[in-house]
Every structure is written in C-alpha cells, then in structure tokens.
Image (cartoon, rainbow, N blue to C red):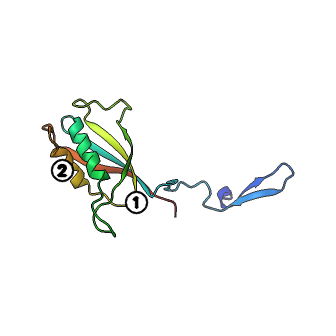
C-alpha cells in the first residue's frame, strides 16, 4: 500500500485541488508562537517552599546578569503553577513550576542557590530544573 502522507491534497467541492502538502505534513514540531523562547522551570524543595524562597527564585530569573551573549539574561515570568493546579501555599507547597519567556540562557544552579539563601528560608534543599523548552520554529 502506498504511503498516503507523501502527497496529501485538500480538494474543494468542485474537485479542484486547493492545497497540497508534502511528506512532512502532520508531523509534530517544536514551536513557539510569539516569544523568543518559553521555558518551563521546576523548583522543588525537600520540605516546602515559602514566599521568600519563591520570591528569591523569581528575582533570580528576572534579573539581567549579562549582555552580548555573556551571562544569563532576564526572563519574564508568564505563569506560576503547581503539578495539580492547586494554588501555591507558602510553607505547604513543595514544587512550583515557572513558565518563563525570554531569549537568553538560565543557570539553574543560581536559581537553586537564590532559593536556598532567601531570608526566612526553610531547611529544605532545592532542585531547579528546566522541564521543557519551546523555541520558535525554524
């Protein structure tokens, strides 16, 4: 049987071809609509995260630390969430996800250090990890 995805046509009611797609039609691609890059960052604690720790991590990712390709770049926090969609509760929630938008780089070790060093921080050890990166289609 022939591979039907090597040539896919969209036909109008009169039988005329409206569009033809090549072999790559319907294949999944990494893409992002309108920002440089979008990153999903996980911030987890072995205990819980409090407001000061989360604020310190957010300050770290939104602070410009370099220019002309050196150092990390400032990102915009486009969303804060939890794995189950519940609200963040200071001193109760142990994992938070940040949806970040920007064009530069992040150093997760710096984000971890910022959270652990926050004034009023708890006794937990933090893990910061990039979970997903959405980049513009090329």
Residue 7: assigned label: none
Q: Inspect this view and state whether residue 49 appears.
A: no
Name the residue at 25% across, 35% down. 94
Residue 69, relative to residue 26: is it above or below?
below
Ranked by sequence position, the earlier of labels 1 and 2 is 1
**What residue is pinned by disc 1?**
103
Q: Which quadrant of the view contains residue 22? A: bottom right
User: Which residue is pictured at 62% across the width and 57% down the height?
Assistant: 25
Looking at the picture, does residue 36 appear above or below residue 120? below
Determine which residue is flagged by label 2: 113
Q: Position of residue 115 (x, y in %)?
A: 20, 45
Q: Is 31 situated above or below 54?
A: below
Q: What kind of element bears circle 1?
A: loop
Q: Position of residue 16 (x, y in %)?
A: 83, 56
- Tell me which corner region of the image, top left, top right, bottom left or bottom right, holds residue 17: bottom right
Helix, strand or loop under label 2: helix
User: Which of these two is toward me, 34 or 30?
Assistant: 34
Residue 81 visible within the image: yes
């Amino acid at each position: 049987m022939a591979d039907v995805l090597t040539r896919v046509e969209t036909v109008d009611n009169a039988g005329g071809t409206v569009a033809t797609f090549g072999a790559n039609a319907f294949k999944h691609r990494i893409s992002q609509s309108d920002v440089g890059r979008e990153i999903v960052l996980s911030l987890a604690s072995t205990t819980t995260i409090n407001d000061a720790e989360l604020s310190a991590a957010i300050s770290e990712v939104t602070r410009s630390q370099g220019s002309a390709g050196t150092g990390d770049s400032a990102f915009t926090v486009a969303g804060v969430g939890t794995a189950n969609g519940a609200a963040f509760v200071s001193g109760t929630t142990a994992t938070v996800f940040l949806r970040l938008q920007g064009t530069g780089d992040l150093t997760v070790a710096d984000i971890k250090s910022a959270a652990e060093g926050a004034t009023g921080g708890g006794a937990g050890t933090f893990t910061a990890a990039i979970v997903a990166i959405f980049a513009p289609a090329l």
